[in-house]
Amino acid sequence: MQKFLSVLFISVFCNLYYAQNAKKILPCYDLSQVVKVKPTPIYKPHLDASKSFGIQLLKDSKTVQKYINNGKFRKIKKSGKGYRVQKLNYSRAYMVSKAKATLEKMAARFSKETKGHTFTVSSMTRTLEDQCRLRRVNSNASLGISSHNYGNSFDISYIRFNDVLKYNPKMEAALEKVLQYYANAGRIYYIKERQQSCYHITVRNY
């Protein structure tokens, strides 16, 4: 009986402790620290462009849902002319209207240039909580605020075309040609990320 009461006491104590400290444990990021991380010079234009769409920093699912409900975030289909979206474990298939339209136009141009081939979108909109989860499995994920946190950035793999994970220099060159065209037109910024094998693209509010 004494052993049972001891176990019961420990169980009740633990439940009370975790209930009282839940807000301290979650979310898994510390916003006061996140905002202190300064972007690199090459990345700063991406953040500046992201903030120009009037979207608040996406902290959690509730923030994303708010923009879905008011029509500012549009759903991205799993596939379309010239593109496929891989399974998204750490991001969400929603973006601002201009980002959605730009992705679709880029994909259609890529399809035309390559006579029907497709590229793969590997990441889209992330909350700070998504980013925190991603860092647990990928130490290269941003420690600070990412342009993904505003709903107008996406990543395109340069080692996966036509749903095949394989280095394809011809397809990569065709993809970069499309990216360069849109960058020169003032519609996007892009960075080639070596560690993630993807192009990070941020749509500008042109």
Image: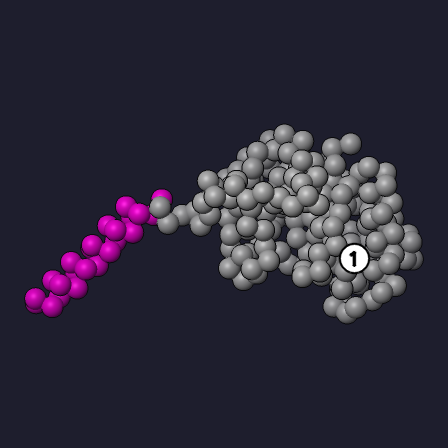
Q: Look at the image and tell me whether residue 36 can be seen.
A: yes
Q: Compared with residue 11, is residue 56 higher up or lower down, i.e. above or below?
A: above
Which residue occupies the foreground of this view, 11 or 43?
A: 43
Per the image, is 195 magenta?
A: no
Q: Compared with residue 35, is residue 174 higher up or lower down, i.e. above or below?
A: below
Q: Position of residue 196 (x, y in %)?
A: 67, 60
Q: Position of residue 201 (x, y in %)?
A: 73, 47
The residue under the point 64% across, 34% down is 51
Per the image, is 13 magenta?
A: yes
The residue under the point 36% across, 44% down is 23
Coloring applied to the structure: one colour
Classified by dominant secondary structure, the portion drawn in magenta counts as helix
As drawn, is 2 to the left or to the right of 59? left
The residue under the point 59% across, 55% down is 141
Q: Which residue is mark 1?
A: 119
Residue 186 found in image quarter: top right
- Helix, strand or loop at label 1? It is strand
As drawn, is 127 to the left or to the right of 87? left
Q: Compared with residue 150, is residue 135 higher up or lower down, i.e. above or below?
A: below
Q: Identify residue type, mark 1.
A: Phe
* Number of marks: 1
Identify the image quadrant of the C terminus. top right
Question: What residue span does the magenta drawing correspond to?
Answer: 1-23
Which residue occupies the foreground of this view, 197 or 32?
A: 32
As drawn, is 119 to the left or to the right of 145? right
